[in-house]
Image (cartoon, rainbow, N blue to C red):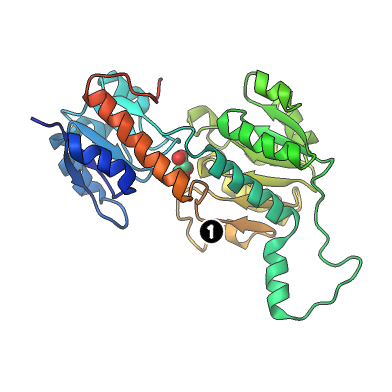
Amino acid sequence: MKPKVLVTRSIPEAGLALLRERVDLEIGPSEGFMPREVLLAKLPLFDGVLCLLKDRMDREALDAATRLKVLSNYGVGYDNIDVPYATAKGIVVTNTPDVLTEATADMAFALLLAVARRLSEAERIAREGKWAWAPDFLLGADLHGATLGLVGFGRIGKAVARRAKGFGLRIRYTLARPSAEGDELGAVHVPIPEDLLAESDFVSLHVPLVAETRHFMNEERFRRMKPGAIFVNTGRGGLVDQEALARALNEGWIAGAGLDVFDPEPLPAEHPLFRAKNLLPAPHIGSATPNARNGMAVCAATNLLAVLEGRTPPNPVLV
Ligand code: DGY
């Protein structure tokens, strides 16, 4: 008998096609997410679940999943899953690294450039048609010769560093072990995050959201940044104390921010962050390219099938 697999929401066909042949497949809604109570009711029926970042796989959900062998996350971030608890229950958790690295690094760099050169403001002014070129008109920040501080120097952090090198930025990173790739890019390891924040003109976050990194960017750390600095987050909203960031922007502790991620998502329109000056928000589109999303689908399906077929999955999340 084929194993029973639930994909909690429709994903690209490239991944579903791999599953159709080899498992008894149920696919959730093609829009939105599976409501929590529906998910909880279904979980006891499946050997494998391919879940998305909105599916909260906490103790309650994992306890309901009595025959579950594998939880394959469609995404590299796995803060939606209680990995230690799943692992203790013998459920293998997997994620989708690599396939979205370049797309997410592009997004971080797009935000960095857009905030540096004030593109939101520029677009609005250009559309209004009431402007005149002037020596001091809409001046932005130079990238060339400035310092980029990367918090996290894993796959995505390094991909951002590769782009930064081409733009003539000096590269610093923290919260990671020095590595060969870092040396090649001329990136310098700064052991103390506060030092990195104090010397960077641009700061970009590339660490996973786990208990130790929640609100990594708090009021104290925003106050450490340069008044002209620009902050970028394409990781997870929970890495940032968003009220502190709103104050940092409004009170000029930093010059601007580009955010692709929020806590919660979507962040309610009335949140103080949306009234902050020089904020460029985006709706979590870091991995939103066909290549990345197809790659994620294939990767998540491959991980799931490997576990159900008794093989080691390519991308286990280890505690
Ligand atoms: C991930 O894979 O964690 C991304 O945030 C999805 O876009």
Residue at mark 1:
271
Give left or right: position of 226 versus 48.
Answer: right
Q: Please state the horizontal and vertical placement of residue 109, each as a whole percent of the image.
A: 65, 46
Residue at 72 percent across and 35 percent down: it is: 149
Q: Relative to residue 112, is residue 270 depicted above or below?
A: below
Q: Which residue reaches farthest left?
A: 1
10 Å crowding of disc 1: few (<14), some (14-19), many (20+): few
Give left or right: position of 6 versus 142.
Answer: left
Label 1 element class: loop
Q: Please state the horizontal and vertical placement of residue 18, each as a whole percent of the image.
A: 26, 38
Residue at 30 percent across and 52 percent down: it is: 33
Q: Please state the horizontal and vertical placement of residue 91, each as a whole percent of the image.
A: 26, 24
In this view, the residue in front, 53 or 290, is 290
In this view, the residue in front, 23 or 316, is 23
Q: Please state the horizontal and vertical placement of residue 255, each as a whole percent of the image.
A: 75, 52
Residue at 68 percent across and 69 percent down: it is: 123
Quadrant of residue 192 within the rendered picture? top right
Residue at 62 percent across and 23 percent down: it is: 176
